[in-house]
Amino acid sequence: MLASWNNRKALLAKTIILTVFLIIISIGGIFMEEAALETDFSRKNLSPCFKYLFGTDNLGRDMFARTMCGLSASIRIGILASAFSSVIALVFGIAAALGKRIDFIVNFLIDLIMSVPHILFLIIISLCFGKGVRGVVIGLSLTHWTSLARVIRAEVVQLKQQPYIKISGKLGKGKLYIAFQHMLPHVFPQFAAGLVLMFPHAVLHEASITFLGFGLSNEQPAIGVILSESTKYLVSGMWWLAFFPGVMLVIVVICFYAAGNNLRKVLNSASAHN
Amino acid sequence: MILEAKNITYKYRRDSKYIYRDFSIKVESGSRLGVIAPSGFGKTTLCKLLSGYEKPLSGKVLLDGKNLLSYKGYCPVQMIWQQPEIAVNPRIKMRSILAEGDNLRESLLEDLGIKDEWMDRYPQELSGGELQRFCIARALGEKTKFLLADEITTMLDMVTQSGIWHFLIEETVRRNIGMVIVSHNRPLLEHVCTEIYNLCQ
């Protein structure tokens, strides 16, 4: 009893530490935007040193500030996109409870979007909406909901067979009432964990389409932009231009992944709502 | 009112054997029909058919001559399930579970011995017997005309059993509700029912 309580507490503590770390990066990055854009040719191409932790690039910009700023932008875009995306997933997943025809349409949409690689849809949608932050967020939101929607739909389909759902129907309750009153509490843990776990995907995809030139614009200090610029200088031995931003991106993604998994464990344990 | 099954045929899968073949049964308001059969004879299936949870392959379940499945909204035929644990949503508090019933009168809870402190608990924090009382209360809404009891007191001790049956008989007689009581316990049925039907015949 005590052991499981401690376990839960440890999980929660870990999740909180990870969250605080991510919040610091995302807020700190906003304040570094000026420093990230500042060029100074007297300090160009410096390798990492005490003053410039991540070195500087060929325009003399501080790579630490640029990395933080880029990560912050990525995290904010990721939060926005996964929030939209998971709401779409929740609505479509629960819509499966409303009738066979709606369920068929939802399933068809999921299959349709899943059958094409994410990145292709992302590029097309992002281009359609004029690239930039808007294009990326809309693109990410419209492509990332499928797997979570499938998980929620599976749960809903299983719930529909439960006696208490059928009884509720015989007591004269409508499908909408049943979906919100009976099914939502069951799919909520999946939803919350799915929301956080969608995040790493969104951040990585944002970075990759920006890297490919279909995402954020070049002036913006985004991780994708930094990485794609650095490829030009890698051959001349300036490894720090790609190394630190890349490592930081991976660390942020791992943090989100760990936080999501912890959250799922906390929410899914049998005693979660006691 | 009359609840009747007319020439119903039923089996669960296409390749399984028939559970009911040209089967008919009839209950009137205010009477209590006991149905007795050993395990596996389709007692629960009969309840599900009579309350519209399952649809007969042929034949009809009629309430006052009208097909039961054509009633929209609150179903006048309510069934109380054998295992209360699966009949309540584990993520919803008892108060909201009861709120699903149709205009339950206040004294119902008192009559069934439901304590106020149980209302703010989740189903897994109550025992089977306590849960079953909630299920009985929930099924006794204003618009309920027939009540199907599927082995509802098998998990209770004798004293509680007798308390619940006394209450149910008093309540259904007063409101002129018809009952179908399913059990394999003949002495119980002989005690509470006005007539007994043996499924084995």
Image: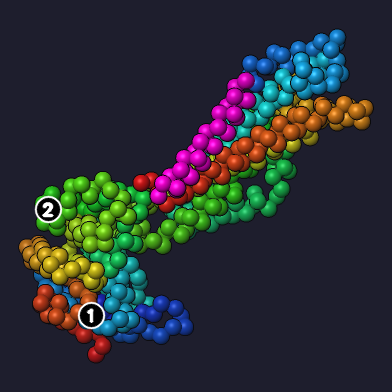
Q: Circle 1: is it few (<14), some (14-19), or many (20+) Cα within 10 Å?
A: some
Quadrant of the frame with the N terminus of chain B = bottom left
Q: Name the amino acid, label 1.
A: His
Q: Is residue B170 visible?
A: yes
Q: Main secondary structure of the magenta part?
A: helix
In the figure, is residue A227 to the left or right of A26?
Answer: right
Earlier sequence position, callout 2 versus callout 1: 2
Q: Badge 2 is on which residue?
A: B110
| Residue visible at 11% across and 74% down in the picture | B192
| Residue visible at 54% across and 37% down in the picture | A14
Q: Badge 1 is on which residue?
A: B184
Q: Quadrant of residue B199?
A: bottom left
Q: Name the amino acid, label 2.
A: Glu
Work out whether residue B21 or residue A245 is closer to the camera in this orientation and state it.
A245
In the figure, is residue A163 to the left or right of B145?
Answer: right
Where is residue A125? Give x, y as percent. Answer: 68, 37
Q: CA distance from mark 2 to mark 1?
A: 29 Å
Chain letter for mark 2, please: B
Q: Residue A76's mark? A: none
The answer to if A211 sits in the magenta stretch is no
Q: Quadrant of residue B130?
A: bottom left
Work out whether residue B123 or residue A122 is closer to the camera in this orientation and state it.
B123
Where is residue A58? Give x, y as percent. Answer: 86, 18
Magenta stretch bounds:
A1-28
